[in-house]
Amino acid sequence: MDSKGQDIPAHLNELTQQIIGAAIEVHRALGPGLLERSYQLALLHELALREVFSASEVAIEIEYKGIVLPGHRLDLVVASAIVVELKAVEQVADTHLAQLVSYLRAGRYPIGLLINFNVPVLTKGVFRRVNSAALAHVSAFSATSASDSASLRSPSGGSP
């Protein structure tokens, strides 16, 4: 579940770039070595300064054979579309990326970012994953919205 071969809508790519830019700003100011929670609060603040809607500690329901497994929370959800999982670890493990993928599937989110702040250069700590099933739904919705908008125009091509 990565972004190779995926047609990601432009607005999601732009939003991803805004998140990464905000994280870079936080990392420049704070550097590596702090607790994950410090980076979470700083990134929330930086996104708010940039007028990018985000929510923290978003509860997510993970189901198993008819029951809900409680206690799962997403570090950040940006614009109700992108999950941001934050880490402050020596090295990102496969299990960290698997956790992000599980959250994308459970919440039906199209894009996920894992950002590890415990690196000298933040771009080395950014990982993106794509949920193809959710992305197809977003792409279909975007295409429908575009065709609906087109159908609202008058036959002359002007505004109704």
Image (cartoon, rainbow, N blue to C red):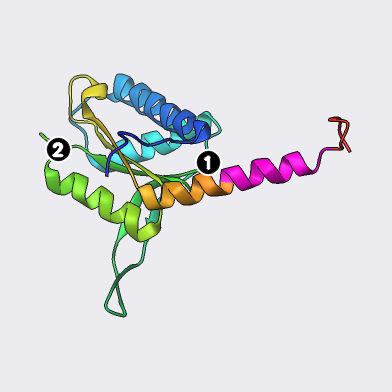
Is residue 37 or residue 16 the one in the foreground?
16
Q: Which residue is drawn at 37% across and 34% down?
A: 42
Residue 159: give x, y in percent of width and height.
Answer: 86, 33
Residue under circle 1?
Answer: 53
The N terminus lies in which quarter of the figure?
top left
Identify the image quadrant of residue 117: top left
Q: Which residue is drawn at 35% across and 28% down?
A: 23
Q: Is residue 144 magenta?
A: yes
Crowding around mark 2 (Cα neighbors within 10 Å: few <14, some 14 to 19, many 20+) is some
With 11 as the anchor, is 3 left or right in this view? left
Most common SS among magenta residues: helix
Three-letter amino acid code at the position of disc 1: Phe
Query: Which mark lies nearer to you, 2 or 1?
Result: 2
Residue under circle 2?
Answer: 92
Identify the image quadrant of residue 68: bottom left
Q: What stretch is highlighted in magenta?
A: 142-153
Instruction: Determine if residue 112 is in view.
Output: yes
Q: Which residue is drawn at 31% across and 19% down?
A: 28
With 85 as the anchor, is 142 left or right in this view? right
Q: Is residue 58 magenta?
A: no
**Numbered disc 2: secondary structure:** loop
**Numbered disc 1: secondary structure:** loop
The C terminus lies in which quarter of the figure?
top right
> Which labelled disc corresponds to residue 10?
none
Three-letter amino acid code at the position of disc 2: Val
Identify the image quadrant of residue 24: top left
